[in-house]
Image: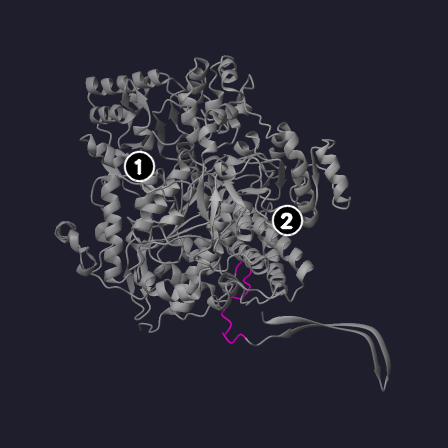
Amino acid sequence: MSCEPWQCAEIAATKKANPIQKPEIAVAMIKRAVRPILVVGSNATARFMEGKPLIDFLIDFANASKVPVVATAHMVSEFLKRGYTPAGYMSAMDIGNRLVDPTWQGLDGKGHPDLAIFVGLPYYMESLILSGLKHFAPDLKTMTIDNLYHAHASWSYPNSTLEAWAENLKVMTLKFKEGGN
Amino acid sequence: MTTKNVRVKIDELKTNLGLIKNLDLSVGKIVDDSWTEPMGPTPMPGLTTLRDWDMTLLNKYKPFYMPDCDLCCLCTYGKCDLTAGKRGACGLNIADQSSRIVLIACCIGAATHNGHARHVVDHLIEKYGRRYPLDIGGLNVKVEAPVTRLVTGVRPQTLGDLDEVLTYCESQITHLLSVAHTGQESSNLDFESKALHAGRIDQVGMEVADIAQVSVFDFPKADPEAPLIKMGIGTVDQSKPVIMCIGHNVVPSVGIIDYMKEQKLDDKMEVVGLCCTAIDNTRYFDRAKIVGPISWELRFIRGGFADVVVLDEQCVRTDASLEAERVKAPVIAASEKNCIGYKNRTNDPADQIVEDLVSGKVPGVLILDPEKVGEVAVKVANRVAPIRKKMKSLPEIEEIKELAKKCRNCNMCQRSCPQDLSIPKAIKAAAEGNYAPLADLYEECIGCGRCEEACPVKLEIHSFILKIGEKNMLEETNYCRSGRGAIQDVEIRSVGGPIVLGEIPGIVALVGCANYPHGGKDVYDICREFALRRFIVVTSGCSAMSAGSYRNEEGKTLYEEFPGGFEAGGVLNVGSCVSNPHIAGAAIKVANIFAKRNLRGNYEEIADYIHNRVGAVGLAWGAYSQKAASIASGFWSLGVPVLVGPHGSKYRRMLLGREDKPDNWEVYDARTGDKVNVGPAPEHLFQTVETPQEAMVTIAKLCIRPNDTWKGRSIKLSHYIDLHKRHYGLMPPDIDRFIRTPADIPMTMKDEITALLKAKGWKESIIPDPTLLPRMIRKTKE
């Protein structure tokens, strides 16, 4: 699939995301990070694959990878309903604003994240936040595990189908389960 | 007004000295001293007069930039790549450029409202004279122009006074826009300060426009019981000729309505409106009807309901004329700001223009004389209606099935849709004779038409959606309360204390357009939630329409369910876009009427008062224009937080507080000069929220103010906690930041919260007399 912004008018950036051609690559990048976080947006309950909402895939992934989750919007309640407690929750703008602050010591106060993974925000909103991070958090790596290409991330999957998305998420989860974290 | 022009004109005067003929003498201005309020420190502020106040706010709420574009392409040195700290050929970096774009947006918005005001005021002065008195609400509204008084130090009493206020505004907008030129300002915070100034000027311009039209056109004058207006396509009697007015400037519509009345046709025709012209039409003529917000333009035109389309200014689809041509509806362009390429027929005889439009010789005309617009529109509508027979440009259902089979499944419709709607699936289903997914899109689509533009086989996807939703469209019958205008002084006296003390938990203002999937319903739900919680809910413009577009279980719209007064549990529509300063004005009047603070040219002190004491929050839910940027900026400048829905993130800059940084939340106690940490109240000045659930929780939280009494804080916290638990499923983690004394704890949650405070090592603090201004400290510590 293509590495063009999913929404046509979201023009390409001068510095574009490296495509994640295989989920194993994403897993390797995440494993390399010391303090990753996963930011989950409100589409987590609005996107369905294989008869399940996205959030179910993400909980499996978070449990396997042990990457701390930051839920945006009202998603914290959806996580709690499913028996998963996110490491934190705040508005998407607030987490973006903290990530551009090099003095922010992360959700646990132990250090600034070195990798921010985004998934499930409205496309244009995620694109803007990733742009803000690209410009104002030069030491931070960003990744999106959506099925839509985000030019402003450091790494992004190409545009792909829901079926391919589900498969990617499952493979990533499996790789963490197999290989530990 | 403090100054007046004096002009002496003598046709003939015989004196001992001789005969004087045709003497015309202007002696400039004389001072009117009848306003005894002392002048404050900042009348008619320039670009930097309030810079210190701006920087105080910008230090507390720092900009978070999300550039929409890595480039600057505003001059021929460029394009310059500003990615991640690079500077362009002029030296600007991406933060500067981002704030520069904010300033430009605010200048466009401010210029638009001030241009609107200028047109209205000049037209009314030409017709009624400079001395025409302003009357906003008779004896009920003595503070007739709180924003103008506050910013300019002027108390306008006549149309001529408004002219002079606008002259000041126009000079400021010129200076502000010039700042965006290459090689001017070089600090993002200074750009931001100037954007705040643009917001102040915008508020003045809007206020001028509205008080001029309220006074002269006899709109409802601060009337809590302004009439209920029929709203929705289903309320339009299609057996009658229909004139549709689109835009924001009511002057041409007044010409139409006056002519209809003169000809005794006002019950034989329909005048309907879209966008703010619709709201203002109903303020002038309560039998005018509101069709809907800005996003209904294609719906209404393609549906063939209009026999004549009259376009004025602002928020008019620039292809509205092309769409009207398709349904053989003649178009009258009525604003010099929106000429549409039509020939200017202002000076032609009306009947000749009518003949040309009825015969189809020309699809549209430009007429800049509102009375002539009225005559031509009425005559054309009456003659065209029997010929057009409400001709539509919608396909038949069977046609949709056949056309849908042409779809190439390229997904470009979805990729072009601002909402990322599942259009390809709906088209595929339609090709198989299943129209349910298209029907679902009717509720979600905002009517922008981008899907059609992207389609490589030119499927008229929006028309498909409209046809499938046609039955729903024809059944849309609701009520909107006509715009009431200002808030009465007596209303402020009644609620000023409870607002400042926190016992009325907040003022929630829903403004702008709800262009978002289910956005109208979201606006309704949010309004109702907070009205039931006894907040004061204020609306304007397209949000006022959305608020009235749904009904409760008893079949009542919000305007039937709740009172229209500025009171706990009231749901008010102040009017159109230019009525928004009545909302800011209410907050200003709380400071003036309730707290006895002087307004006149005293911006900083009043803004500080509002920021620390008046629990007001604005919400603009849908996608909107540059005008929302300037409207929001006017509220930010007063220290009032504004929330936007997801599309609002595209304003590309938020003003965010950091609740995790205690130093951010210190205020002075004006009694002692001590610095007191008051917690994140309010936490943000400009923030995007993602879902209506998040909006509700955030609104309740943003209404908290440092000055709340223990009783008021307890009430506010009970709403915040209740909404947080309902939508987030747990107790707010920051509750300890808002509790100053045990009395602040809501009684029903005492045990739970007390345990939480203990676990967090909470310590009691004081309730200060809060201010951000050192000069407001009454006793300076040594």
Element on which disc 2 rests: loop
Give percent across and percent down for residue B152.
54, 64
Quarter of the picture containing the C terminus of chain B is bottom left
Q: Does the magenta stretch include residue A67?
A: no
Distance (Cα) linking label 2 and label 1: 58 Å
Nearer to us in this view, A22 or B472 = B472
Residue B544 % position (x, y): 45, 46
Give the residue type at disc 2.
Answer: Lys
Most common SS among magenta residues:
loop
Please tell me how many numbered marks the rendered image carries. 2
Tag 2 residue: B264
Q: Mark 1 points at which residue?
A: A72
Neighbour class for label 2 at 10 Å: few (<14), some, many (≥20)?
Answer: few
Q: What stretch is highlighted in magenta?
A: B35-48
- Where does the image place residue B626, in percent across and percent down from the top left? 52, 44
Q: Does the magenta stretch include residue B45?
A: yes
Mark 1 and mark 2 in contact (Cβ < 8 Å)? Answer: no
Q: Do labels 2 and 1 share a chain?
A: no
> On the image, which quarter does residue B622 sit in?
top left
